[in-house]
Structure formats: C-alpha cells, structure tokens
C-alpha cells in the first residue's frame, strides 16, 4: 500500500487546522481546529505504522492514536468548561476577550 494518500489527507487536515487557529476569533472554532490537527497526527501515526510494519502484529501506531484521542477528549472537556465560564461572564467567546477572565 502506498502511503501517499493518507499522508496527503493528513497534510490537508493539518493545514486546515493551522489556518483555523490563525484566522479564527471564535474560541469554539479554534478548539475544532486543534481537533483537526490532532486527527491529522493520528492518521500519520497509523499510516507510518502500516508502512514500517505491514505484516506484523505491531499496533504501536494505533495505541498512540488511542492515547491521543483520550488526551483530546480531556482537552475538549477543559476547553469547553473555560469557554462556558467566559461566555457566562462576558457574553462572547471571542479569543480576544480571554485575557479579561482574570479580572
């Protein structure tokens, strides 16, 4: 199997995620962009695991991908809690207003 397809998909997802982080002001969209970037890393891990050990029972790429999914779920939980608090206090989820939470 050629790794070109999964690697191009991962590159596209990662670039869309970076663009979303740089260009967006809405914090929910920034969190979604981070998730896109983490999914691109997961695709790379599984693609390289299949490229390096195609016929063996090594599943290290899939195990790392599951670990990243668990960390991403925790990150979304904490991030959404922060965003709910920001929306309750400031009535917006604009990234520029995040520094106002300390007051």
Image: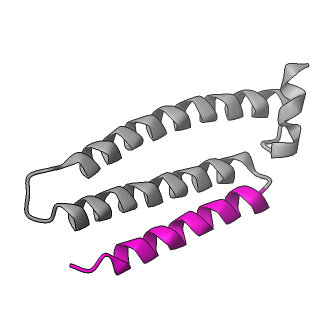
- Say how the picture is coloured: one colour
Position above or below: 2 against 31 = below
The N terminus lies in which quarter of the figure?
Answer: bottom left
Residue 93 appears at what percent x and percent y?
78, 42
Position above or below: 13 against 46 = below
Which residue occupies 32% across, 44% down?
A: 64
From the viewer's perspective, is 77 left or right of 44?
right
49 or 72: nearer the viewer: 49
From the viewer's perspective, is 87 left or right of 38?
right
> Does the segment drawn in magenta span residue 31?
no
Residue 43 appears at what percent x and percent y?
37, 61
32 or 47: nearer the viewer: 47
What is the number of callouts on the image? Answer: 0
Magenta highlight range: 1-24
From the viewer's perspective, is 24 left or right of 100?
left
Residue 2 appears at what percent x and percent y?
26, 80
Principal secondary structure, stretch drawn in magenta = helix
Residue 88 appears at what percent x and percent y?
77, 28
The answer to which quarter of the image holds residue 41 is bottom left
Which residue occupies 83% across, 35% down?
A: 98
């Amino acid at each position: 199997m050629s790794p070109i397809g999964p690697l191009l998909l991962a590159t596209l997802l990662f670039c869309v995620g970076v663009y979303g982080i740089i260009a967006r002001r809405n914090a929910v969209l920034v969190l979604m962009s981070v998730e896109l970037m983490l999914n691109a890393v997961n695709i790379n891990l599984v693609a390289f695991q299949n490229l390096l050990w195609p016929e063996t029972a090594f599943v290290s790429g899939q195990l790392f991908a599951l670990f990243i999914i668990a960390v991403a779920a925790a990150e979304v939980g904490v991030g959404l809690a922060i965003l709910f608090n920001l929306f309750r206090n400031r009535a917006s989820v604009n990234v520029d207003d995040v520094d106002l939470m300390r007051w």
